[in-house]
Image: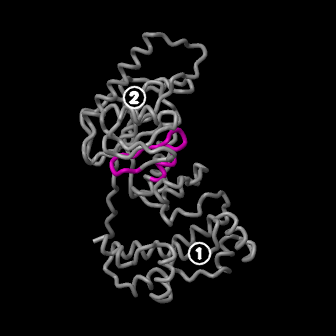
Amino acid sequence: MKQAEAVRRIAVYAVLPPRTLLLDAAGPLEVLRRANMVQDAVRFDVRYIGPARSASTSIGLTVTGIAPFPPTLPDGAMVVVAGDVDAVMSPDVKRTAADDHDDAINQARIIDWLRAAIRPGHRLVTICSGALLAARAGLLDGYKCTTHYLSSNELAEIAPRANVLDNRLYVDDGERCSSAGVTAGIDLMLYLVSQMVDHVCALAVARYLVVYLRRSGADPQLSPWLEGRNHLHPAVHRVQDAMTASPAKPWTLAALAKIAGASPRHLSRLFNEHVGMNMADYRNRLRVALAHELIGHTRLDMERVAERAGFASTRQFRRVWHRLYAGSPRQVRSAAR
């Protein structure tokens, strides 16, 4: 009897500051909730922590049941720090100087805990102005980072040794990941899910949330497996799902049209319109992506790589490869080793 593979568990600690911008927390963590539902290989164990048992939020709701800060974090833990707002939408409640004083004390507790708890091997993820708390803890020094455009100057002042990048949806710099804020936190978490689980999971979550897989020109490049998915057409997605699942298969237009439930001519038009490339180009990108993985993770020679990826010959493989990559396949293998 085949033994079930062990589930990889990732401890996630969501830090909720006073006056939490609710979407900063709810958006990225909804990505993780859905990721837990669509696959079984990786489990995100989420805990909500903070300096107080409850926290007010940007839209006037109060979040309760927040756990105290743990004294230590397990290896491989991910800490997600949400941003906050200056004013809460609560017209019937007037803030006092005492409220501001309490919030300042609680923010200082967050900073102290981050400084003491975050160690090498932990991934720190900041959403929106959550980067300011990490910066005050000295945890962004020497790292590339970003934040909401209204907080960029403040972040640069707080952390002069950090490389603050503007006009980014998100930045991945190893154990430090940051987003521009609000909905960009969803973009960052989708990207991280594609890295920690796989592209299939990230696509499934994005489609469930009905969001695009966005990136700006300077953001980390989307995997070839995720390209051309910024649309909502179900028939085109079905065709892409089939091609992604078996990129080396000798797909015919007729077979793909049957999956789409459309005529070959209509599918070709839909595919170009929604994906931004024709099906042959899309297929070749998937095959090159598969070849790239085989080169980096196996010892197969180039002829076998080309065959496994669905190319008719090594000559065809190299021709398509050089349309997409500047370096040669052998350079990729050398770098992987």
According to the picture, the residue beneath numbered tag 2 turns out to be 66
Q: Which residues fall within the magenta stretch? A: 172-191
Q: Is residue 8 left or right of residue 309?
A: left
Using the image as rendered, state which of residue 271 and residue 325 is in the foreground: 325
Crowding near pointer 2: few (<14 within 10 Å), some, many (20+)? some
Q: Are marks 2 and 1 in contact (CB under 8 Å)?
A: no
Q: Amino acid at mark 1?
A: Asp
Q: Residue furthest top?
A: 97
Count residues near mark 1 (Cα–Cα under 10 Å), then give few for <14, some for 14-19, many for 20+.
few
Quadrant of residue 236 in the image? bottom right
Q: As displayed, is residue 168 above or below residue 326?
A: above
Q: Which residue is mark 1?
A: 281
**Quadrant location of the C terminus in the rendered image:** bottom left
Look at the image and tell me whether residue 148 can be seen. yes
Asked which colour scheme the image uses, the reply is: one colour
Q: Position of residue 151 (x, y in %)?
A: 48, 33
Q: Residue at x 59, y 80 (%)?
A: 251
Question: Is 277 situated left or right of 317 in this image?
Answer: right
In this rendering, the answer to whether 306 lies above or below 267 is below
Up-down relation of residue 30 to residue 21 (above or below):
below
Three-letter amino acid code at the position of disc 2: Ile
